[in-house]
Amino acid sequence: MDLSYGSEYGVFRQQVRDFIEANRDQAPAAGARGPAGLAWQKLLIDNGYHSRTVPKAYGGYGAAPDILASRIIAEEFSAAQLSTGLGGQGISMLTPMLLEMGSEAQKLQFIQPTILGEMVWCQGYSEPGAGSDLASLTTKAELDGDEWVINGQKIWTSTAQSADWIFCLVRTEPQAPKHQGISFLLFRMDTPGIEVRPLVDMTGDANFNEVFFTDVRVPKHQIVGERGQGWQVANAILGHERGSLAPPDAAENRLKGIIKLMETETLDGQRIMDNPIFRDRLMKLQGASLAMRFNDMRLLSARINPGQDARLAGLIVKLQGTELRHEIEGFAIDVMGEIGLAYEDNPYLRGNGSWQYQYMYYLGLIIGGGTSQIQKNIIGERGLDLPREPKVTAN
């Protein structure tokens, strides 16, 4: 099996390395949205290292699709432990969906400010009674002249407290079967009638929110697709979401950080790296990380070579990726011993507390975006063709 990219990509890889070497001093911390983060984002787009295939008309670089080039970019930025720019729901999920299903006016209005980080989005999907069974949502939108009037509630809404806009699933056809009565609306978060209540999670931050809608009025044209087609739009987005929650490059980066920890932290005067038990645990995680990387290569190969069946390879990404990240962060805490229990303003923190924070954050992501139990059902039913889970009959 030849896993190399071929000699023709050698020049491109060197170009990426040259850019990194020349500009690494401008790179902010990963995900930073301040002036430095926005400037870095623009620099990446201008050079084709972010939003590479988004057409120039919508603010992107405008390159022809080249999966291997995109993969090389990811590999080199990961090796340099350099920020690959902004992500989030607007960039990683909404933008590719708009390119596929949005109107021309929507593409022109939303894509450029979104990929530049100037327009922040949140996702209005889950509800208190519609989490794993999202199609049971009850937030309703009724047409009143040229406006939708929205009433209902969403929950677990990431970044709602800081978002400019929301893409939201609402029920517009109450008499239709549940998957067919949903529409997909876009509207501003400062629209009258919206109330956001932060939910503090185990990290100590409000990474999620409750959002309440009371007679929120939204222009009729701010719908993606046709009325009642929201489920198809939502499924297109969910595919992008589940693939972006725990990419293999990020796992490899964290393992590199653990290796540094193991070379500096000690136990009874001995480096942790010289302890065979910890070294064995590291190798197991490295093996799992490599397996995820090669699974990602399988998906790339299937995209390049139509006709290959990579359905099962795609289904395992969210389940394996989030659980692996949680294990990696937990292993780092074990490496640090009692210092691994430090948090917030403790003077003995390592890595500014990112290991502890990410450990708790990824426990949440094992649930978010479809729980591991739901993912296993999907893998079994759609990937392995096992019998569908029995439905419980209501009394």
Image (cartoon, rainbow, N blue to C red):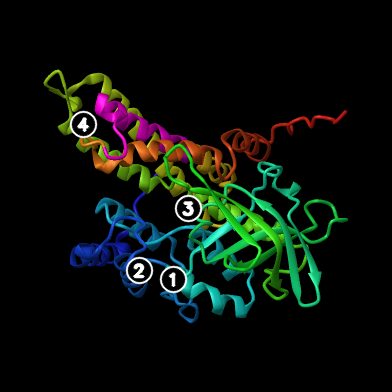
82 left or right of 212 in image: left
Q: Which numbered mark, 4 or 3, is in the foreground of this view?
A: 4
Label 3 with label 2: CB-CB less than 8 Å: no
Disc 4 to disc 1, C-alpha distance: 39 Å
x, y percentage for residue 268? 14, 18
Q: Is residue 120 above or below residue 159?
A: below
Q: Is residue 199 above or below residue 274?
A: below
Q: Is residue 287 above or below residue 245?
A: above
Q: Which residues are magenta?
A: 320-345
Q: Which numbered mark, 1 or 3, is in the foreground of this view?
A: 1
- Amino acid under label 1? Glu
Q: Quadrant of the N terminus?
A: top left
Q: Quadrant of the C terminus?
A: top right
Q: Which numbered mark, 4 or 2, is in the foreground of this view?
A: 2
Helix, strand or loop for disc 4: helix
Q: Report the front residue among 138 and 205.
A: 205
Helix, strand or loop for disc 1: loop
Helix, strand or loop for disc 3: helix
x, y percentage for residue 252? 33, 43
Residue 221 position by quadrant: bottom right
Residue at the disc numbered 2 = 38
**Which residue is at a point 68% across and 52% down the rendered structure image?**
153
Q: Assess disc 2: are there few (<14), some (14-19) or many (≥20) residues with their C-alpha within 10 Å of its C-alpha.
A: many
* Mark 3 or 2, nearer chain start: 2
User: Which disc is residue 363 wearing?
Assistant: none
